[in-house]
Image: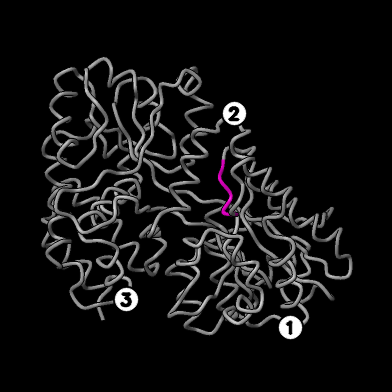
Amino acid sequence: MALSRRTLLGLAAGVPVSAALAACGSSGPGKSGNGATYWYLNGQPQEGVRAGAVDAFNKARPDERIADTTFQNDAYKTKIKTAIGAGQAPTIIWGWGGGTLRTYAEAGQVEDLTSWFDEHSEVRKRLFPSSFGAATVDGKIYAMPCETVQPIILYYNRKVFDQVGVEPPQSWEDIMALVPRFNAKGIAPFSLGGQSRWTNMMWLEFLFDRIGGPELFQAIVEGEKNAWSHPDAITALTKVQELVEAGGFVKGFSSITADSNADQALLYTGRAAMMLQGAWSYGIQKTDGGDFVPSGALGFMNFPPVEGGKGDPSGAVGNPAQYLSISSKASAEQKKVAKDFFATGVLQDDEVKKWIGNGSVPIRLGTEKLLAASESADFLRFTYDLASKAEVFTQSWDQALSPTAAETLLDNIVKLFQLSVSPEQFARNLNAVTGK
């Protein structure tokens, strides 16, 4: 097989880690000479930015090279867990932080970086403070935040709002009042790709935060007994079912997939008035929506407060960043290379410019001028302010929880939206997999 330095393992599903490495020509974890190994996701344009950062580091430090290997998303999730469990992890482990990182940290499989960040405070100071929450386990830092911030945003179609003669919602009460107004005009109040499950989850993430404050979900993450049954949790679960019952979502939402971008098409074609989606949705709507974004028809805002709620209206939910950890099994030499990459190779100027060029907001502070020069300046500045100024940035629940708990969560969210379980039944089902 003809081999290149950058190897793709995304098609080797089901192949044992050691065999896959040998078959694809990678030198394998722990066998890169004086350098380090690094696995991350493929797919453009993100892959090109990641590869460019590695290439720049290797050029600047020829004695401390990084050998990188790329994977397709689903294949990566399987292979990295298998490799770590088998003691064959790459030196640098790309991930989403949160619950999965916690399992690695508690098993002693990733390096404690707390003292390193203390010694390299300048590295920490250049990143969004909110990005460190999902990198932290029991007060210790186990990952380097990297790449971009991806908050969940409430998008709306300005033309549809003007057509109906209403204003964007400033509260949960406004949302409920808008539902019959749009339905009366044959417009779905909210688009939703409900078959994808995680899209439904975004509604609960915001309602839990706005009603109970960040402490509500934190109690769940920490395994507090019966945390899902807290009165504020039941209130949030009840409110989302009230929205379903009121006809808040497009008909047939349970059969619409987010992966096909069908939910976003409903918004930019005017068949739906609003949509909760990630920051990445902006680029999709800009590409696929014709003149929808260039004409200024796309509106965006943070999720509004709930009357009487304990949460800060500035709070954000979503993906605070992506994360790089160091395998505890790596050699001292490899760990040094990885840490040098964290200090001098991650989110350097060229990488930052590439992320912004792709319509993303890198988690490095001080990029306001670069964002302002982008053709998507208004949206990027909104995203930057939302993420950098949020008092609390709650990580997406399916990443914050353990993999087992996350799967139970997603299954029960579908049932909640289909009204086949009550809020109390939902809470009992989740307490069983998250409480101590």
Res. 401 mark: none
Q: Main secondary structure of the magenta part?
A: loop
Q: Which residue is mark 2?
A: 375
Instruction: Give residue 331's mark.
Output: 1
Q: Amino acid at mark 2?
A: Glu
Query: Of tags 3 and 1, which is closer to the observer?
Result: 3
Residue 294 is a magenta residue = no
Please tell me whether mark 1 sits on a helix, a strand or a loop: loop
Q: Position of residue 138 (x, y in %)?
A: 43, 80
Q: Amino acid at mark 1?
A: Ser
Position of the N terminus by quadrant: bottom right
The answer to whether 363 appears left or right of 427 in the picture is right
Q: Disc 3 marks which residue?
A: 222
User: How many marks overall?
Assistant: 3
Q: Nearer the viewer, mark 2 or mark 1?
A: 2
Q: Are marks 2 and 3 in contact (CB under 8 Å)?
A: no
- The residue located at (40%, 59%) in the rendering is 395
Q: Which residues are magenta?
A: 360-364
Callout in the foreground (2, 3): 2
The residue lying at 56 percent from left, 42 percent from top is 360
Q: Residues within 10 Å of mark 1 (few under 14, many from 20)?
A: some
What residue is shown at x 15% (from left), y 61% (from top)?
232
Q: Nearer the viewer, residue 370 or 204?
A: 370
